[in-house]
Amino acid sequence: MTNKGLSTEPYKGMRDFYPEDMAVQRYIFDVWSETAESFGFERYDAPILEPSDLYKSKGAENEEMVNQQTYTFTDRGDREVTMRPEMTPSVARMVAGRRRELTYPVRWYSIPNLFRYERPQKGRLREHYQLNCDIFGADHFSIDVEIIALAYHTFLNFGATPDMFEIRINNRKEMSALYESVGITDTEEQTKITRLNDRFRKIEKDDYKNELMEILGDKELVKKVYALISAEGEQPSNKVLEGLKVLGIKNVVVDRSLARGFDYYTGTIFELFDVSGENNRSMLGGGRYDNLTALFGGEPITGIGFGMGDVTMRDFLTTHNLLTAGITAPTLMILPTDEEFNIEAQKIALEFRAAGVSVCVDPTTKKVGRKISDAADAFVSYVLVLGENEMKSQTYTVKNLEEKSEVSGTLAELIEKIAD
Amino acid sequence: MTNKGLSTEPYKGMRDFYPEDMAVQRYIFDVWSETAESFGFERYDAPILEPSDLYKSKGAENEEMVNQQTYTFTDRGDREVTMRPEMTPSVARMVAGRRRELTYPVRWYSIPNLFRYERPQKGRLREHYQLNCDIFGADHFSIDVEIIALAYHTFLNFGATPDMFEIRINNRKEMSALYESVGITDTEEQTKITRLNDRFRKIEKDDYKNELMEILGDKELVKKVYALISAEGEQPSNKVLEGLKVLGIKNVVVDRSLARGFDYYTGTIFELFDVSGENNRSMLGGGRYDNLTALFGGEPITGIGFGMGDVTMRDFLTTHNLLTAGITAPTLMILPTDEEFNIEAQKIALEFRAAGVSVCVDPTTKKVGRKISDAADAFVSYVLVLGENEMKSQTYTVKNLEEKSEVSGTLAELIEKIAD
């Protein structure tokens, strides 16, 4: 082995979480789970490996996606497996597996890590975490309102205000009806327009119209469809939008160009955007899927859900100065002046711990002054120096590093003080 | 597609966590992280995929292990990657990557999921979670005492008593010295004995002696080594054992046959066993490794740590009747008598939620009686029925499903009551 040795970098596109990053990650997960639970959602999880068929079985297009954009390999039992790129197929599998035992509506959430094999770029990594919330077995539009309200309140619970983000909604069924209203009844033509719409905000108006002309081959029709999609004239509305207004959620627009990537959506679809201009990627996306559990046989169970990623969430919180989470340091550090007091120091630590104080020992041979300054650098609040005098007198002094004050007493007295 | 469709089972050897299983899992993780933090440990994490070299680089034996017992595959960039089978190499990589910035001792913990490609059996699955605790950059024996005390207190914090489990410790350096004391100086011979010792408690005395004879080829030497390993005569002791006694930890023995699988251990090694006889597998194992960070170049940083699995933990808690964690249900469910009140129900839910009450709506068309019994089955504490009368009068009734009592009032009055 050379002296240089193996690389200390993580695998490309994936992250190490050193304690200061982990503290941010845990803060984000805590807000996610507290919000979901305040809406009565229960947490679940599933394995990271799934049979590849779970993602491929929805058609040739999906097969291509699985082959090119996921971590897929064959295990030694000759099964093709995929590291989960999304959670919805797994949760649909779990719901289908207990379809008869469950009481509907089922409200479930999860915080899985997901994997995609792509060139890493801003806001998209090869491993990321996602809050996934789904409601199964209820199709009243108030459920669509509820799931969007949950997304909205998640942002509010991070300290965001409604002017920082915008929710865009659309509806696949309504879009079909609109296309039919101008005479486009061919579902393949409709699907082509939906895919084109996915780029509506990314390309020039004229390019959009030209591509639309290629699909439709009729200038008048192109005009009509363009008017629909761009919502020239009246701002469209729908029941979900009205329901959200009743709940006081007003930063929502119906966006006829909103398409969403996955083919399995059948009704309401929605995305949430940062309006600061700093983060162009959608922060969250979801929708209603009526047929996903049918993959497992039996009558389909309707579902609606969304996924919200940790990478974009962190970018959003940073942009809007909402990240306040800091590292968790132990409350107290015990500093023996000599190695021979290390075991006694561990014993004293146990007594503080029994009273609920987080505490550890610096067992090194550093000078006490250095031990104190290292403790301060690590954001420790209190230190207790343990030397010959303390060992003999059984009287100890605790220094408050923040307030630069100190207090002396027996162990019992000090434990009572610090545990407060 | 046939009507039967895809399987709803998880991938072999891996687990779905339905909400009731997830509640147990979260309880275990919570006790783990609370205990580690009470000892001043900070949480970190690393990617699930690592370059295979991280596990292979410790010799041919490791290469065989990686090839046969892990999920290893080649990515599209022609890099060989492995789904992490253990956490220690990743944490050593992270420490080595910041060797100059860190203040020692570093106390870190993590709760990673780990993967191994084996036939699933009791206590061993293909995906499992582990509490990993490590201390870097301090080699005083009081640190060995501390890490074992942390393992011990984790069990106590689950409600276990010391009579339910036993800690066995040994020391690789002491074993070398013992072998040398009887004239076995060849390190290869020593390694062979260590590997044989790994089966000491699983095979017959005579078989053990015969295999020892094959290694040593000297009857007198076999007798001496057997006496050492079986500790016939006096119970051996060491400084770590004595230190643990000072901390009141007495269910510990020095076990000269304790070997531990990984080759990287260099000093203290330890395992923890359930003494009920129900769970024979070691519940936890660890030890000191002096040279692991040297893989990444530079001066090695000493480390000591352990891993404790969720599968064996759960078995232990079940065996000893220590599992009390239940599912988390919403506190309140709002039950509209008709779909037309669903949005108003969502609005009322938001108001309770703002006061810290977890609440959801049953938006289905079920009869109210059925909605109430479903809520009771789901362990919901309170229900509020929302019908025409309530809509008109703006006076509502909350039923306590556990105490079979009820209280009426305005929304503000009821929110105040329930939020209490």
Image (tube, coloured by chain):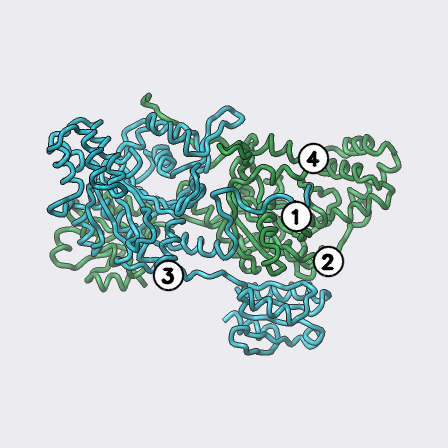
Chain colours: A cyan, B green
Q: Are marks 4 and 3 in contact (CB under 8 Å)?
A: no
**Circle 4 chain:** B
Name the amino acid type tagged 1: Gly
Tag 4 residue: B202
CA gap between label 2 and label 4 equals 28 Å
CA gap between label 2 and label 1 equals 36 Å
Does A198 sit left or right of B230 as displayed? left
Name the amino acid type tagged 2: Glu
Q: Which quarter of the image is occupied by the C terminus of chain B?
A: bottom left
**B383 is higher (above) or lower (below) than B364:** below
Q: Quadrant of residue B281?
A: top right
Work out whether disc 1 and disc 4 sit on a shared chain.
yes
Tag 3 residue: A321
Work out whether disc 3 and disc 1 sit on a shared chain.
no
**Circle 2 chain:** B
CA gap between label 1 and label 4 equals 39 Å
Name the amino acid type tagged 4: Lys
**A31 is higher (above) or lower (below) than A382:** above
Q: Which quarter of the image is occupied by the N terminus of chain B?
A: top left
Q: Are marks 2 and 1 in contact (CB under 8 Å)?
A: no
Work out whether disc 2 and disc 1 sit on a shared chain.
yes
* Residue B27 in picture, x, y percent from top left: 47, 50
Residue furthest top in the image: B2
The residue lying toward the viewer, choosing from B362 and A318, is A318
Tag 2 residue: B242
User: Which numbered disc flags the more N-terminal residue, 1 or 4?
Assistant: 4
Q: Which mark is residue B297?
A: 1
Name the amino acid type tagged 3: Asn
- In the rendered image, is residue A389 in sight? yes
User: Which numbered disc flags the more N-terminal residue, 2 or 1?
Assistant: 2
**Circle 3 chain:** A
